Image (cartoon, rainbow, N blue to C red):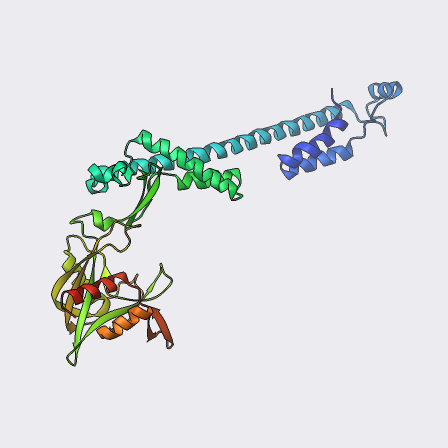
Amino acid sequence: MMSVRFMSPLLQRSLSSCFLPKSVGRVCVKLNRFINFPVAPNFQQKRLFSAHPNPEGHTMNKTKKLGLYLICGGAFLVSLFYFVKNTERLNFSGAHASSSAQIVDENALTRYFELLERYPKLKREGDLNDHTKGAYEIIYDRGGILATRKEVYDRLYKKAKLQGLTDQQADEMATSFSRPGVVFEDQFWLVLRDVVVSPQGHRHTYNRHLKKSDLEGNGNGGAAALPIIVENGVKKIVLQLAFRHATNSWEMEIPRGNSNANETPMATAQREVEEETGYETSNVVSLGSIAPDTGLTASIIPVFLGTVTLEKRTKHDKTEAIKAKYAFTLAEIMTGLKRGYMEVEVNKKITQVPMRDPFLTYAVLMAQCDGHL
């Protein structure tokens, strides 16, 4: 049998340092100091041990020796238990990560097919879904989606490795960025990642950002309005100074916003003008519709023009950051659009506020074409 003197320091150095609690490690240290067996007892020492219970300076009685064997054996079993549990935890962690990714993948695709079934307008058909006719063709069968996803994953993984990422980092990035289906959803927005075939026959993924209000009810996702106020016989365009989270800056814009349930686009335009500027408008006319960013979102926003008839108090939503309103002549607006900014006072400081609102540009152009300005 292995001697206790040999067994104790072994437990102390190896097992206790990796898997055992510190208390078990301290037990091993004290055992190592307490035990005083000779490394290789000679014949006479063995006789002394068997004949005398506790020959001082050589060993201890058999009862204590047995107790120490039991303690060391118990410490070994405890260390083995911690080793097994630690291994199980590591294995579970890896399996859990893989399982979690598979669950997210399945949920994204399940929700995707649910939305396609519920909103037929999300699906593309005919020549508009034929890559040989110059369009992006969306793949709708699950097998084709998963096969393309694997191709996209491989490309992203290789790219990540070339950038110096570890295997785990590259896998996590490629898994997330290649995941098809619904990849983001909140109360306002949906982000769909379609699997598509380009006109050149290249298979890849393409994101679509959708407003939920575009899909619900009457399909109206909002409206914008160009308020016109007449001061001393001169027509002026009303703009609002708003801080925009996305651009991280102040912006000069015309009023706009999402529609309420069962609200017409014209009613939305009038309501937004009143809430954001305090002006009530009449003689509202349509100027057309604008697609603000065809590369990102499917939203098509109606734009209207209305004449200010009454000033009320503003009713800013508590989530908005609208600071002030201004009225400019058409000449001032055109100058601001040309140079790219309008100089106004912001927080007691003259500031060059960007003039780059696409709704404003479109509305001014269409108002001129229709003879309203």
Q: Residue placed at 81% from the left, 23% from the top?
A: 53
53 to the left or right of 160: right
Count of numbered marks: 0
Residue 132 appears in the rendering: yes
332 to the left or right of 179: left
Q: Residue placed at 33% from the left, 74% from the top?
A: 343
Q: Residue placed at 65% from the left, 30% from the top?
A: 75
Using the image as rendered, state which of residue 144 and residue 51 is in the foreground.
144
Question: Looking at the picture, how far across and down is residue 180, in whole percent?
Answer: 34, 38
Q: Residue furthest left?
A: 283
Quarter of the view holding residue 336 = bottom left
Q: Residue placed at 68% from the left, 32% from the top?
A: 14
Question: Looking at the picture, how far across and down is residue 217, in whole percent?
Answer: 17, 48
Using the image as rendered, state which of residue 108 and residue 301 is in the foreground.
301
69 to the left or right of 176: right
Question: Looking at the picture, how far across and down is residue 54, in whole percent?
Answer: 82, 26
Quarter of the view holding residue 1 = top right
Q: Residue furthest bottom?
A: 232
Using the image as rendered, state which of residue 235 and residue 201 is in the foreground.
201
Rendered view: 35 above or below 257: above
56 to the left or right of 112: right
Residue 328 appears in the rendering: no
Quadrant that contains the C terminus: bottom left
Question: Looking at the picture, how far across and down is residue 223, in whole percent?
Answer: 20, 58
